[in-house]
Amino acid sequence: MAHSPAVLGGYLQLSRAMKRAKLDRGISERLSIAIQVHQGCELCLESHINAARALGIDEAEIERSRAGTSDDPAVAAIIALALQIYREPTSITDEQVSALREHCYSDREIADIVGIVTLNILTGAFNLLAGLTP
C-alpha cells in the first residue's frame, strides 16, 4: 500500500474509523469470517478466526460463521445482510433492514455493516494482490 499514498491513507482512515464502530466486536469478527470465506484471503480469514477465538467465540459458532450463518437468529440475520452487501447490494430490501431493527440493531450498527464489509474487501483484495499468505 505504501506505493499508493491514496490507498494507504484511505485504508488507515477507514481502519481507524471502524475501531469506533458501535457493532459488537464478536459480531464484527463473525461478519469478517463470513466475508473472507467468499473473498478467499486466507491471511484475513485466519486473523479473524483468531480474533473471534480471543473474544471467546466457540469453534462451533466460528464454523457457522464460515458457513454464513449463526446459531443466534439475530447474528444470522446480520451475517446474511453483510454477505448480501458483499455479493449483491442492489438486492437489499427495506424489509431486511426492518428485520434487523426488530432484532434490536440500531441504524448505526446497521450502517457499520457496510464499513466492515468495505474494510474486508479492501484488506483482503490487497493481501491477495500482494500474494500475502498465512
Image (spheres, rainbow, N blue to C red):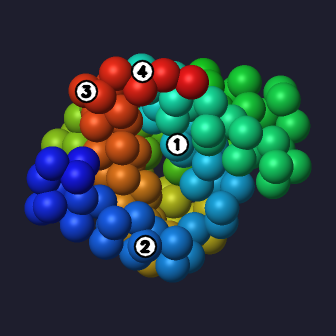
Residue that label 2 marks: 16
Q: Residue 25 lies in what quarter of the image?
A: bottom right
Position of 129 with respect to 6 (left or right) is right
Q: Are marks 4 and 1 in contact (CB under 8 Å)?
A: no
Residue that label 3 marks: 129
Give the amino acid at mark 2. Answer: Arg
Position of 61 with respect to 99 (left or right) is right
Give the amino acid at mark 3. Answer: Leu
Residue that label 4 marks: 40
Q: For the residues marked 4 and 3, what is the alpha-carbon distance in whole angstroms?
A: 12 Å
| Disc nearer the start of the sequence (4/3) | 4
Give the amino acid at mark 4. Answer: Gly
Residue 39 appears in view: no
Measured as percent of width and height from the top left, residue 15 is found at: 41, 65
Give the amino acid at mark 1. Answer: Ser
Comparing labels 2 and 1, the label whose residue is closer to the camera? 2
| Disc nearer the start of the sequence (1/3) | 1
Position of 46 with respect to 8 (left or right) is right
Q: For the residues marked 1 and 3, what is the alpha-carbon distance in whole angstroms?
A: 19 Å
Label 4 crowd (10 A; few <14 / some 14-19 / many >=20): few
Residue 57 appears in view: yes
| Disc nearer the start of the sequence (2/1) | 2
| Disc nearer the start of the sequence (4/1) | 1
SS label for mark 1: helix
Measured as percent of width and height from the top left, residue 75 is found at: 65, 49
SS label for mark 3: helix
Q: Residue at x 29, y 33 (%)?
A: 125
Label 3 crowd (10 A; few <14 / some 14-19 / many >=20): few
Q: For the residues marked 4 and 1, what is the alpha-carbon distance in whole angstroms?
A: 12 Å
Q: Residue at x 61, y 38 (%)?
A: 47
